[in-house]
Image: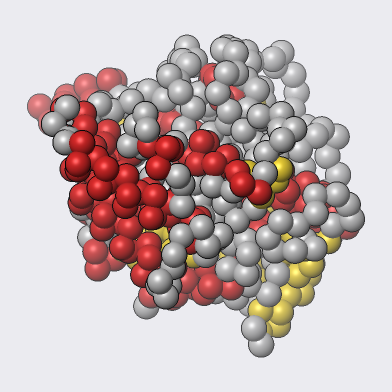
Amino acid sequence: MKSLSLIAALLASAAPAFAQAPPAPVSPPAPAAGGPPNSGPPGIPMSRAYPAGPVEPLPAPKRFVTKHVLTVGKQRIAYTAIAGETWLYSRAADPIGSIFSYTYLKDGPGDPNRPVLFVFNGGPGSSSLWLHMGAVGPRRVVLDREVNPSNTPPFGVADNPHSVLDVADLVFIDPVGTGYSRPIGKGSTADFWGVDEDADATAQFIELWLTEHKRWNAPKFVMGESYGSVRAAILPRALMGGPMYVGYMRGITLNGVILLGTTLGARNAGGEAGAAELRQALALPAMADTAWYFQKIDRKGRSLEAFHQEVLAFARGDYVEALKKATAGTLTPADRAALVARLTGYTGLPASAYDRALTVNEGAFSRMLLADKGLQVGAYDSRYTLPTAGSGNDPVADDPAMGRYVPGFLAAFHQMEAESLKVDMARPYGAIVWRDLLPSWNWNRAGVPEGQSFATDLAVAMRRTEKMRVLVASGYYDLVTHSATAEQSVEDAKLPKDRLTLRRYESGHMLYLGDTAAAFSNDVRELIRDATK
């Protein structure tokens, strides 16, 4: 009886997202880095979450079902596409939210044990169209060039020969507030716009999907990009459930987690002594890789990977130690001069760039590297360039990468919806939604120590599920979510190395752009096959 009383007390004190009154929205001190899919730009005014609207009779969820054929490798795949709404429910069984998703099921006799991959992007505030149209979906955007494409129509859409539909059924999830997904009935945005709230809503959607499609016994995988890597890292907790989180047991485990543009560090964590210096030092390899790409440094015959490893070793060693000494005021003038010489040799920047500090932030680097040519490099993919002059200084619209490929992605997606999926919705599709959503996002978490990293959530999940595998994929030319930082976060969290795969691709934040989609898809296939042996 004592144990039952304890569980009852735990359940009463737990904080399930749908069981309590909607939390007051809080303003994060600063948005996390990233675009499609990480955080949006700073400076957005604070806004309260939308209240629930009048409760009226709800129409039935919309569904659009079509049949298609795709060739992947030498395999011809007939498949069914289901685009439509799934209602989410409160603990009182009231519909409070509608998730719009895109499901692709391989046709045939039906195998309840066929793997299924759930896919989402980030933000918070991004729909799933980026991974949908750029990486693993059955259709793909066609740009006139893989790097620095034109951003004016016409654009193209074609079958994706790199889709992983050959090894898994696919489900692309648009979180509430993105795409066509929205609160309904008695629901409000506060039920969904938060770290825990979002994870619980996504877990409930997966639970409902498995029931509808009779796939509870299927091997299950999730893929998340940018903030989606945070969602993917904490989803195992919401899918399993427990008295300290969500308040009941779902009992769903994952075979694998795939992270892109990974950002798993703790928010607002002070960290141990030297943590700030390490974060600064780990930004160096991505800048150096960019300098290597544009041949602003002497390559000395070094491959990109060999150069990256050399710079990474310097960043983790001599550089971070020098930054600590500079903070303490003990770095000698001679040592400083020697350090600046090495920094200029790795970044291609002039020594004057380090006159005021021994670090250069990514924004300044993007403007300085090709200043002699009047060009700025992209933050989301530093291979992309635009003239420095005339910029409106918007961190997304004026980014040389985002400003180039976003129009093509959107056009291809809407063309696919209309012509292939026959989707007919009466409201606009929210590709990325910053207004209201981002400033209202609740970063408070339940049941974890303050300052715990999201990588630690992933480590806990791997301890609970001893066969779960993790792939951390990064782009060398990503100045938003650095590969070195992502790899350091999983190292610090002590993820089991025998089930952890680290991959870097010669691309940027959306690491499947620039002739790297095939390599990335093959790595995903390998993870799925290894995890289902």
Q: Residue at x 53, y 73 (%)?
A: 519
In percent of the image, x 38 and y 62: which residue is there? Answer: 308
Question: Which of the pair 277/204 is nearer the observer?
Answer: 277
User: Which one is in front, 397 or 451?
Assistant: 397
> Quarter of the image containing the N terminus?
top left
Residue 151 in view here: yes
Q: Nearer the viewer, residue 353 or 137?
A: 353
Quarter of the figure with the C terminus: bottom left
Which image quarter: residue 239? top left
Locate residue 531: give its quadrant: bottom left
Residue at the image position 85 percent from the left and 34 percent from the top: 426
Displayed quadrant of residue 177? top right
Q: Is residue 254 left or right of residue 42?
A: left
136 versus 193 height, above or below: below
In the displayed structure, would residue 205 be above or below residue 299? Answer: above
Residue drawn at (13%, 31%) of the image: 330
Residue at the bottom extreme, as displayed: 74
**With respect to residue 278, does 475 lie above or below?**
below
How many labels sit on residues?
A: 0
Query: Residue 56: x and y, percent?
Result: 74, 19
Q: Is residue 241 visible?
A: no
Q: Nearer the viewer, residue 518 or 16?
A: 518
Residue 434 x %, y %: 63, 27
Q: Is residue 505 above or below residue 508?
A: below
Q: Is residue 377 left or right of residue 287?
A: right
